[in-house]
C-alpha cells in the first residue's frame, strides 16, 4: 500500500509545462553541441582538402569555414535564454515558445549548414569527374 488515503488526489503532476520546456530546450542544446563538436572535429580538414583539389568553395562552404569556430556561442546563448525563461514564475508564452523553437532551430540550421558546406563542393567535384 502506498500510504495514500482513499480518495486523495495527486496535486503535483509529474509532467509539468516547465519540465517539458526544460527537456525540449536541453534536447535542442544537446543537438547544437553535437553538431558543433563535429564541425570542430572535421572543419579544419575541409579547407586543405579543397585547396589540394583546386576547388573554389561555394559561398556556404566559405561561410562555414569562416564561422564554425564561433558556433559554440549558439548553445551558450540558448542556455542563457532557457535559464531566463526557467527562472520566471510565469514567463510570457511567446518568449518561452521563441526560446524553445530557437534552441531546436539552431541545431537544425547548424547541421544543415555543415552538411551543405561539406557536400556541395564534393558533389561539384564528382559531377566534373563523371564522363
Image: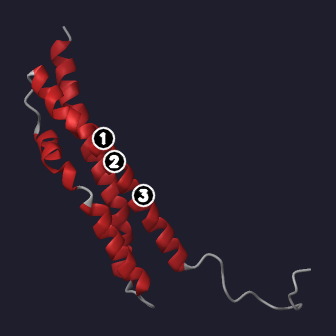
Q: In the rendered image, which quarter contains the N terminus?
A: bottom right
CA neighbours of label 3 inside 10 A, class few (<14), some (14 to 19), many (20+): some
User: Which residue matches tag 3?
Assistant: 30
Q: CA distance from mark 1 to mark 3?
A: 16 Å
Q: Point out the tag, 2 or 3, that comes first from the N-terminus.
A: 3
| Residue 85's disc number | none
Are circles 1 and 2 on residues that touch, CB within 8 Å? yes
Name the colour scheme: secondary structure
Vertical position of residue 3 compared to residue 78: above or below:
below
How far is disc 1 from disc 2 in space, using C-alphas? 6 Å
Q: Residues within 10 Å of mark 2 (few under 14, many from 20)?
A: some
Q: From where the camera sits, is residue 29 visible?
A: yes
Asked if one can make out residue 98 in the rendered structure from this viewpoint, the answer is: no
Residue underneath mark 2? 37
Q: Secondary structure at mark 3?
A: helix
Q: Residue furthest top?
A: 131
Q: Position of residue 90 (x, y in %)?
A: 44, 90
**In this figure, which residue is indicated by the disc labeled 1?**
41
Q: Residue at x 20, y 11 (%)?
A: 130
Question: Between residues 94 and 30, which one lies in front from this camera angle?
Answer: 30
Give the spatial CA distance, label 2 vs label 3.
11 Å
Amino acid at each position: 500500500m502506498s500510504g495514500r488515503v482513499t480518495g486523495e488526489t495527486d496535486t503535483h503532476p509529474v509532467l509539468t509545462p516547465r519540465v517539458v520546456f526544460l527537456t525540449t530546450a536541453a534536447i535542442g542544446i544537446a543537438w547544437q553541441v553535437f553538431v558543433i563538436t563535429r564541425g570542430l572535429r572535421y572543419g579544419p580538414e575541409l579547407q586543405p582538402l579543397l585547396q589540394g583539389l583546386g576547388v573554389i568553395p561555394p559561398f556556404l562552404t566559405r561561410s562555414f569555414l569562416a564561422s564554425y569556430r564561433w558556433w559554440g556561442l549558439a548553445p551558450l546563448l540558448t542556455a542563457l535564454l532557457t535559464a531566463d525563461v526557467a527562472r520566471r514564475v510565469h514567463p510570457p508564452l511567446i518568449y518561452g515558445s521563441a526560446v524553445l523553437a530557437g534552441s531546436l532551430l539552431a541545431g537544425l540550421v547548424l547541421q544543415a549548414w555543415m552538411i551543405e558546406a561539406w557536400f556541395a563542393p564534393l558533389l561539384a567535384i564528382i559531377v566534373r569527374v563523371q564522363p
